[in-house]
Image (cartoon, rainbow, N blue to C red):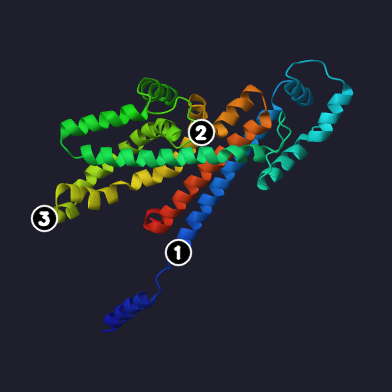
Amino acid sequence: MTHTSSSSAAVAERDTTPAPRRPSVTRQVLLTIGRKVVAAVVVLWGAATVAFFAQTALPGDRATVILNIRAGQAQVRTAAELAQINAQYGLQRPLIVQYLDYLGGLLRGDFGTSYQQFRPVTAIIGEQLGATVVLSLTAILFAWVLMVVWVTLTAGRGPRIGGVGSTVDVFAAGLPAYWLGIILLLVFALGLRWFPVLSGSGVNGLILPALTLAIPLAGFMSQSTRAEFERSLDQPFVLSARMRGMGDWGIRLRHVLRHAIIPAVTLSGWALGATLSGAVIVESIFNRPGIGSVLVGAVNSQDLPVVVGIVTLVAVVYVVANLLVDIVYTLVDPRMEVS
């Protein structure tokens, strides 16, 4: 009797012992977002640091390089000329001081002054950024349309059609932008004359450059979307929809596609940075205004502040876009991160 009573007391004691508290989902989500933000800041700091020291690693005296770039020829410079440039750009200060000033300028949105144009780099980039952003967003829109149409038409249609769809995905994803741009230009601009040879800034001249960026992007996105699309076709909700009398196209567009495009949404942050960097080639091929054309001119003229400014801007877009996608993912479905 005593043994039974003591056992009951022990069980009661165990039952009343408070269970260890698990961190709330909200706290874990905030911690996850905080870690992602810190990681993004570290990546941006690393990219800015590499860009700065790439300038200092160039052979020769930087003041001499700047003067030679402005003059368009290499020649011996006097001490007075060098002193003026060193004072203007602060090159006589210790390297660590220049580095800290450089980081401080980036935080204020100051990328320095162009060696050739004698203007702030932010002003030079700002004048051309709008055209590149329009091109990038149009390319992403085209890529989404191409991806959705192609995957919906070919996914889950049997091994033969599905194999053709997968092959086209891989082929499109591997197309080099410079080759594809030239082919589109030769066929649709020079051959069929549907579009202008020199794109300029008009709406009609936007289609071929956007397609040049969109087709490889659509192929890349289709590869990840196709697998999820075919997996969703085997889910119970598809069978339930068929039993309710819904047609094949209705099931694909209303139910399956909604579940299958999640990987493509994840890739959209990466796609924005990819199209911005790809604009360097496309804007040169189609003679469009934008930061790509500015970058090519700056590289040819060795205008390092402009080059570093554009490269840093593209890195910022890459990191921030992916960070925002990650944060939205975490907020929409916290279980993916908490688990």
Q: Does label 3 or label 1 sit earlier along the sequence?
A: 1
Q: Which residue is mark 3?
A: 245
How far apart marks 3 and 2 lie (CA) works out to: 47 Å
Q: Secondary structure at mark 3?
A: loop
Secondary element type, mark 1: helix
> Residue under circle 1?
26
Q: Is residue 176 left or right of residue 164?
A: right
Check whether the beta carbons of the residues at disc 3 and disc 1 lie within 8 A of each other.
no
Q: Secondary structure at mark 2?
A: helix
- Vertical placement of residue 252 versus 188, above or below: below
Of labels 2 and 1, earlier in sequence is: 1
What amino acid is found at the position of numbered circle 1 in the picture? Thr
> Mark on residue 277?
2
- CA gap, disc 3 to disc 1? 41 Å
Q: Percent from the top left, x then y, of residue 186?
A: 39, 20
Instruction: Point out the image quarter for the C terminus.
Output: bottom left
Are circles 2 and 1 on residues that touch, CB within 8 Å?
no
The amino acid on which the numbered mark 2 sits, given as a three-letter code, is Ser
Q: Position of residue 66 (x, y in %)?
A: 75, 25
Give the class, few, some or many, for how many residues have Cα within 10 Å of label 3's Cα (few <14, many ≥20): few
Q: Position of residue 12 (x, y in %)?
A: 33, 79
Q: For the N terminus, which image quadrant?
A: bottom left
Along the viewing direction, whichever of 90 and 272 lies nearer the viewer: 272
Label 2 CA crowd tier, 10 Å (few <14, some 14–19, many 20+): many
Q: Nearer the viewer, mark 2 or mark 1?
A: 2
Q: Position of residue 115 (x, y in %)?
A: 72, 29
Up-down relation of residue 100 to residue 115 (above or below): below
Q: Is residue 91 visible?
A: yes
